[in-house]
């Protein structure tokens, strides 16, 4: 099956880019070398997602838990984000991509924060791929903030699911259809906890520096074949159930 643009139901893809440090260690290099190598993969996957007609791509770049990593490694991650913004700005704008950061970026260098702000403003009316980097982000923190934001504006009122969704960091991203995690671990690591409620999960052993556009496309093809019922039955099962129920009712009536 060829995964053609705009012919699939997968609209929002989230990716946990994991395995950089282990990839480097296996090659007897420092962990930061893996981050540098992995940063080069990001642009390729963004371009492929755009080519395939994905509506939204959210990439986990730095979690709230990552602050506990060595200062040198954190500084490298900051620098890589800065370089990505400078290198990819023109391509993002040219391809009609909307760029945003979700999370706490207060500890980023001023120059990097300025680059983020400028690109978010320049791309805010773009109507193509919604590209989001989760940086300084935690899913529990986002939900907590959404609750508090609603309560401050609506004291004494009960909160609904719709209220929570409207008060998330970037409400128009909507639910995630597919969550991909590279690197071999099978957990979601506090990423988009609200948005992945009905997401399909795909865990690959491939470490992020080795993740390719071909594997990305293959994953999309594989997951697009899955039947997503969102808790209900598919039409065939529903028909079978109705027939069986009708037979049961006839037996009871005759009895």
Image: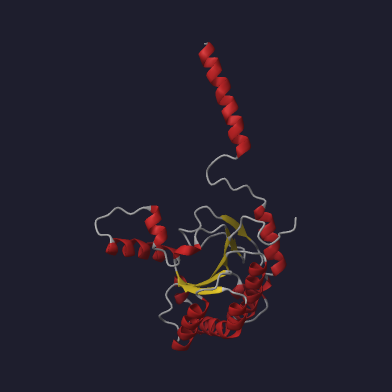
Outermost residue toward the top?
Answer: 255
Residue 56 visible: yes
Q: Quadrant of residue 91?
A: bottom right
Q: Quadrant of residue 109?
A: bottom left
Q: Is residue 145 left or right of residue 189?
A: left
Count the numbered circles shown. 0
Residue 195 pos. (x, y %): 48, 59
**Residue at 64%, 81% in the rendered image:** 29
Q: Is residue 2 left or right of residue 241?
A: right
Outermost residue toward the bottom?
Answer: 111
Here the colouring is secondary structure
Outermost residue toward the left?
Answer: 156
Residue 236 pos. (x, y %): 63, 36
**Residue at 39%, 58% in the rendered image:** 164
Tell which of 207 and 48 is nearer to you. 48
Which quadrant is home to the N terminus? bottom right
Residue 191 visible: no
Residue 36 pos. (x, y %): 61, 81
Tell which of 137 and 174 is nearer to you. 174
**Residue at 41%, 65% in the rendered image:** 142
Residue 124 pos. (x, y %): 50, 75
Question: Would you place residue 255 above or below residue 40 in this image?
Answer: above
Q: Is residue 77 left or right of residue 208?
A: left
Tell which of 20 and 43 is nearer to you. 43
């Amino acid at each position: 099956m060829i995964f053609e643009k705009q012919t699939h139901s997968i609209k929002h893809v989230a990716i946990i880019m994991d395995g950089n440090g282990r990839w480097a260690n296996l090659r007897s290099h420092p962990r930061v070398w893996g981050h540098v190598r992995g940063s080069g993969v990001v642009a390729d996957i963004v371009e492929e997602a755009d080519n395939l007609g994905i509506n939204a791509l959210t990439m986990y770049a730095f979690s709230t838990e990552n602050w506990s990593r060595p200062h040198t490694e954190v500084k490298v991650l900051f620098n890589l984000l800065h370089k990505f913004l400078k290198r990819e700005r023109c391509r993002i704008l040219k391809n009609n991509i909307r760029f945003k950061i979700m999370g706490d970026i207060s500890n980023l260098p001023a120059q990097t924060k300025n680059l983020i702000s400028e690109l978010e403003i320049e791309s805010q009316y773009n109507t193509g791929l919604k590209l989001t980097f989760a940086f300084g982000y935690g899913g529990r923190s986002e939900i907590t903030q959404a609750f508090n934001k609603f309560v401050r504006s609506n004291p004494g009122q009960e909160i609904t699911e719709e209220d929570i969704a409207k008060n998330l960091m970037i409400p128009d991203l909507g639910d995630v259809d597919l969550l991909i995690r590279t690197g071999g671990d099978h957990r979601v690591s506090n990423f988009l906890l609200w948005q992945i409620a009905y997401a399909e999960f795909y865990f690959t052993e491939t470490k992020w520096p080795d993740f390719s556009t071909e594997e990305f496309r293959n994953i999309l093809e594989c997951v697009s074949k899955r039947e997503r019922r969102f808790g209900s039955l598919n039409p065939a099962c529903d028909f079978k159930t109705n027939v069986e129920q009708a037979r049961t009712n006839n037996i009871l009536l005759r009895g």
